[in-house]
Image (cartoon, rainbow, N blue to C red):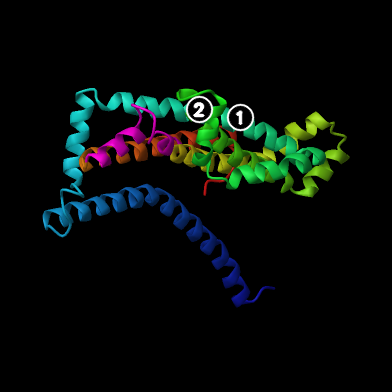
């Protein structure tokens, strides 16, 4: 017969687990409010600092002034070409570099000779500043234009995603591999039912990093030899000390990055429905 203390412990354990689950659900519902609230707090502090003249409003225009300028540029149609130019470059580069990177990374993870041959080259490419190879890409494509900029961004995405996909395959639990072999799975079945599902979470993590890298490199690439793009807007505004327009460009690229990340998260939930939300 169980003692009173053991009975109390047994009864309290489910209660603690229930409280933990309710606490986790509450925190998940609270997360968006905390995220939005903190951003609003930062903007309010910025607005207050400009109003109190703690910072120079000519160099750091208040959020309301920036929003007003963004609205004017949007209604005048001046902002649209810059957003579309940057958006198209990022999309083409991300899709191209990400697709090639995932395929090659999976192949390198599964085929040891291929990994031994290409790993040094990919490692060198990953640590090299991507904007530094832009002049070489210009030479390779015979001059300036859209193609060299897009290729440079695609190379940056490719290097990050390849390393992520290769590492994802190599870190799959050996027990799962052994179970597949014991059930007589052929190479295609092993890839489809073990390697690919096990690699997808890490691959999506690499795609997020690749997306951030794409936005960073495309803005840097637009600083020179272009007349459209958010990078051009930021750099040309800085050169003329039109800081309000510069902040419009910065906010636009931040919103673009946020929307890209949200879209990638939605795709991940569809492709990997079994993954627990963090």
Q: Marks 1 and 2: in contact by CB < 8 Å?
A: no
Q: Which residues are magenta?
A: 218-240
User: In the figure, 192 relative to 21: above or below?
Assistant: above
The numbered disc on residue 175 is none
From this viewpoint, is residue 208 visible? no
Q: Is residue 63 left or right of residue 167?
A: left
| Tag in front: 2 or 1 | 2
Q: Residue at x 35, y 29 (%)?
A: 229
Neighbours of disc 2 within 10 Å: few (<14), some (14-19), many (20+) = many
Of residue 130 and residue 273, the one placed in the foreground of this image is: 130
What kind of element bears circle 1? helix
Nearest the camera: 9 or 240? 240
> Where residue 148 is drawn, which disc sits there?
2
Side (left or right) of 148 relative to 236: right
Q: Is residue 211 magenta?
A: no
- The answer to which of 196 and 13 lies nearer the viewer is 196
Q: In the image, residue 28 lies at what x, y percent?
A: 43, 50
Indicate the position of residue 81 as horizontal and vertical percent values. Answer: 32, 23
> Residue 99 — which label?
1
User: Which residue is at 32% across, 36% downward?
Assistant: 252
Q: Position of residue 160 (x, y in %)?
A: 59, 42
Quadrant where the N terminus is found in the figure: bottom right
Q: In the visual, does 72 lie left or right of 161?
A: left
């Amino acid at each position: 017969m169980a003692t009173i203390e053991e009975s109390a412990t047994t009864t309290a354990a489910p209660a603690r687990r229930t409280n933990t689950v309710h606490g986790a659900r509450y925190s998940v519902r609270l997360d968006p409010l905390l995220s939005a609230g903190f951003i609003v707090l930062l903007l309010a502090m910025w607005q207050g600092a400009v109003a109190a003249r703690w910072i120079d409003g000519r160099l750091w225009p208040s959020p309301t002034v920036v929003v007003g300028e963004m609205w004017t540029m949007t209604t005048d149609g001046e902002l649209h070409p810059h957003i579309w130019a940057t958006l198209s470059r990022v999309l083409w580069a991300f899709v191209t570099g990400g697709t090639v990177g995932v395929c090659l990374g999976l192949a390198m993870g599964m085929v040891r000779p291929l990994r031994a041959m290409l790993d040094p080259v990919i490692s060198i490419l990953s640590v090299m500043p991507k904007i530094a190879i832009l002049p070489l890409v210009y030479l390779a494509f015979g001059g300036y234009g859209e193609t060299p900029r897009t290729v440079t961004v695609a190379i940056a995405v490719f290097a990050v995603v390849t390393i992520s996909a290769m590492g994802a395959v190599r870190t799959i639990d050996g027990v799962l591999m052994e179970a597949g072999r014991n059930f007589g799975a052929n190479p295609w079945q092993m890839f489809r039912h073990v390697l690919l599902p096990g690699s997808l979470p890490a691959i999506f993590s690499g795609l997020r990093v690749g997306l951030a890298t794409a936005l960073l490199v495309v803005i840097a690439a637009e600083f020179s030899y272009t007349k459209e793009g958010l990078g051009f807007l930021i750099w040309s505004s800085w050169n003329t000390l039109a800081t309000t327009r510069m902040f419009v460009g910065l906010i636009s690229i931040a919103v673009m990055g946020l929307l890209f990340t949200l879209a990638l998260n939605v795709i991940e939930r569809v492709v990997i429905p079994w993954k627990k939300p963090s």
